[in-house]
Amino acid sequence: MDIKESFIIALGALRTNKLRAVLTTLGIVIGVMTVIGMMTIVRGINATVEEQFEQIGTNTFFIQKYPAVRTGRLDEKYRNREDLTVEHAEAIKERATLVSRVNPELYMWGQRVRYKGEKTNPDILLYGASEDWQVINGRYVKSGRFIKSFDIRSSRKVCVIGMDIKETLFPFIDPVGQSVRVGSAKFQVIGLLEEKGSTFGQSEDNIVAIPYTTFHKVYGKEWGMNIAVQATTPELINAAIDEVIGILRVERKVPPGKENDFEIITRDSLTETWKNLTGVVFTASIGIAMISLLVGGIGIMNIMLVSVTERTREIGIRKSIGARKKDILWQFIVEAIVLSGLGGFIGIIFGIGLGQLVGAVAPIPSVVPMWSVFVGLGFSSAVGLFFGIYPASKAARLDPITALRHE
């Protein structure tokens, strides 16, 4: 009996019991759909995040009080750390020889901008920035100018706004030179930032930047601060990090032998941390998929055992006219593989559909990795082969005389 004939017999058996075949393959469908869908979603999210990280220069790193990723309650050692201050940033700027730019970054969510009776939603991100902010963050002005050193020295009440604020408050006029209120304080608009778009549905243009000295003067010094540092060249970033660590340990009076009481974050470390997070999510989804495939495989074994019982007389007739054990074995193995492969094919279609649906609803690219399609088909077929061997061997071992007597 060749493969073609076995395949035809398997399809005939599936057509005879359509509903049973569909219910049997449901676990396979869910497992493969989960694998394909999660591969598509995770790949889309990683591509979006990596695109954002690419905007961070290879010679830029950040200093923070807390780790880049925080889950649950922070350890006491992090909560008890001294806050980063403007003095720390100034010490780096004055003493570091491998650093070209330093930007103390303060930020506050939930502000509202007003102009002549019009107002934005209370979801503005307010930055306290230095003159180096736009270069380090890759955000340049479209019109007007950015914050200068004299604005910082004089704590001037000037601001640079994002495109969303311009479209809300100044749809028909140039905002540069106009006066707005950010919260309760009045500022003069000196610049308009170029449009950047959104990330995961969160607009990057709903922001206001003011001098960091003005930020402290108007909104207080209790707000946490990060420090962005740019090394002179990408090749010197590791040396610059070591130099900055030495300066900060002296400024923060960290005893020799004790670990740093601050965190250094680079683009590579952010990318690696993010991939580890999505890797955990993907691993969990693979675990769920494996359970579904196991359930589907047990279902296939059960149905194949039922099929062997139902077709005992047919097996006896085949053996009586010359079918060998391996012919019967191969017939039922092919049927199990076709059954599970059909479930895998349907699961691939649903998985691609799930990825496309998420891509349509969420602002992430939806690209199905072609290798995941072959993995899905391979796994589903392997499940059919593994769980089909026992029923097939049981059918092959049937005595033809006993089988012919079966009613």
Image: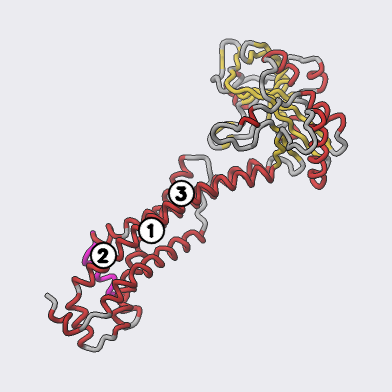
Q: Give the secondary structure at mark 3.
A: helix
Of the numbered discs in the image, which one, if any, rests on residue 303? 2
Look at 43% across and 63% down and name the residue there. 379
Disc 2 residue type (three-letter): Ile
Q: Secondary structure at mark 1?
A: helix
User: Can residue 177 be spotted in the picture?
Assistant: no
Occupied quadrant, residue 232: top right
Q: Which residue is mark 3?
A: 355
Asked if residue 368 is positioned above or below residue 17 in the image, the reply reads: above
The x and y percentages for residue 358 are: 46, 44
Q: Position of residue 388 (x, y in %)?
A: 33, 70
Closer to the N terminus: mark 3 or mark 1?
1
Q: Nearer the viewer, mark 3 or mark 2?
A: 2
Tag 1: residue type? Leu
Residue 72 lies left or right of residue 354; in this view the side is right
Of callouts 3 and 2, the N-terminal one: 2
Q: Which residues are magenta?
A: 8-19
Q: Which residue is nearer to you in this view: 209 or 293?
A: 293
Label 2: how many Cα within 10 Å (few below 14, some 14–19, many 20+):
some
Residue at (81, 47) in percent of width and height? 235
Pointer 3: residues within 10 angstroms few (<14), some, or many (20+)? many
**Residue under the image location 70 percent in, 39 percent down:** 265
Tell me the amino acid under the disc marked 3: Gly
Q: Give the Cα separation between the discs numbered 1 and 2.
A: 15 Å
Contact (Cβ within 8 Å) of mark 1 with mark 2 = no
The answer for how far apart the CA atoms under marks 3 and 2 are is 31 Å
Q: Quadrant of the C terminus?
A: bottom left
